[in-house]
Amino acid sequence: MASFELIATIFENLGRRKARVALTAMGVVIGTAAVVVLVSLGIGLQRSATAELGSIGSLTQIQVYPGYGESGPGMVMRAAPGGGGGGGATDQKLLTSEALQELSALPGVVAVIPQEYSQAGGMISFEGLEGYSSIIGIGTNDLGDMGLTAETGTLELRHSTAVIGHRVPENFFDPRQRFEQERPEPPDLMGKQLVLTLEKWEGDGSQSGPTRKVIQLRVIGIIAEARAEADYSIYVPLDDITAINEWVLGRRISRAKEGYSSVLVQVEDVSQALEVADLITELGYQAYTPQSFIQSANRIFLILQAVFGGIGAISLLVAAIGIANTMTMAILERTREIGLLKAIGATNQDVLSIFLGEAAGIGFIGGIGGVLIGWIGGQVINVLAMAFLVGQATEGGPPPSIAIHTPLWLSLFALVFATLIGLLSGLYPALRAATLVPVTALKYE
């Protein structure tokens, strides 16, 4: 039997029993729609989580800290904290100048930037307002090397200047404000002079009190919102923060002996972040990158998608039983027809192909309906979810994202899977029809 003739026969047979085919295909529609919606939900949640984690920090950045471990090249013996005879010593691989060169030589690394935090307590003042923020010394003249962009001003640091995060002005308050008064509007700090009053305690501090030091910083730039640590930080040149920490400690800081507290490593591409982080760990340092959290989250969501898909597949299993039942009934009703086909020359292969084609056709029709209903249902859920999230969104937070995402490959997979389910469900009835003896079939009442 020619292919065209076979296909025409299959659709003609399906068209003769429209109501039965529609009812049987409805089970496939429900199962396919369930698979599409549930797996799309898992994919949508994964995309939302990935975007959320990606907004926490640049995916091309790796935070590196001194490493602790067994003695080896670059390891420095340092006394363990706590003092006394039981403290012992620990091995620590410091982030010295040699370490910066070692990190810069790694493949894919485009920038290695040392960082230091202020060790002094204190308050920031501006025109009667007071505020607080973390003050970070950065070992680059241009914060653009960290992947940051300027909202206003410049990102090029100079002595006694500062570049502040987008949300730093929100941390200022009026110390004389009464409880019932409204909080003052965040000040415009661009181009203004901030007064930084630092404090340190010497000895027990019970008699002399804290020693204070006043530093003035001119704001030369404001960082565009990054939804990361940079939004709440004040960046100053590394030499300035080193001078502050030396004042706090009362001695000179030797980077060759003490190193830096942390280093920011910038890689060329997101795909290199995990590999470079592993190389840094092998060198004996501690490395952290947002990409590792995303990788862990992706594993969890893959399991979630498999579970969701399995739940939807149960509905398809029920539909498969319905297809098998429909095809078995069709054989009983068309036994004499099968016998007639064989009597006029149809082979077992022809009969098998007809019945398998009908079963696959039911699965295909149900698959198309299920994919369409699943996609429409996903869009409806997205509209409702977006409306809810817009009402719940906080100012400055990430924009609401879609809850369900249906990629093209999922629609095609669901359609093929539904067709395959129909084909497999009709296998036993088709084999039974193909092996009927023509004489016996013609005598069947």
Image (cartoon, rainbow, N blue to C red):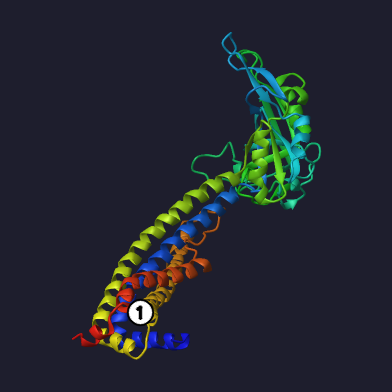
Query: Residue, x 66% and y 24% (percent of image)?
Result: 92
Query: Residue, x 66% and y 34% (percent of image)?
Result: 282
Could you tell me residue 409's position as x and y percent? 52, 67
Could you tell me residue 278's position as x and y percent? 64, 39
On screen, residue 180 above or below 324: above
The quadrant the C terminus occupies is bottom left
Label 1 amino acid? Answer: Phe
Q: Is residue 50 left or right of residue 61?
A: left
Could you tell me residue 250's position as x and y percent? 73, 19
On screen, residue 3 above or below 105: below
In what element is the residue under mark 1? Answer: helix
Residue 407 seen in the figure: no
Residue 258 seen in the figure: yes
On screen, residue 112 above or below 370: above
The quadrant the N terminus occupies is bottom left
The residue at the far top in this view is: 85
The residue at the far bottom in this view is: 344
Q: Which residue is mark 1?
A: 355
Q: Nearer the viewer, residue 269 or 398?
A: 269
Could you tell me residue 142's position as x and y percent? 78, 45
Q: Residues within 10 Å of mark 1 (few under 14, many from 20)?
A: many
Q: Is residue 136 left or right of residue 291?
A: right
Q: Nearer the viewer, residue 57 or 155?
A: 57
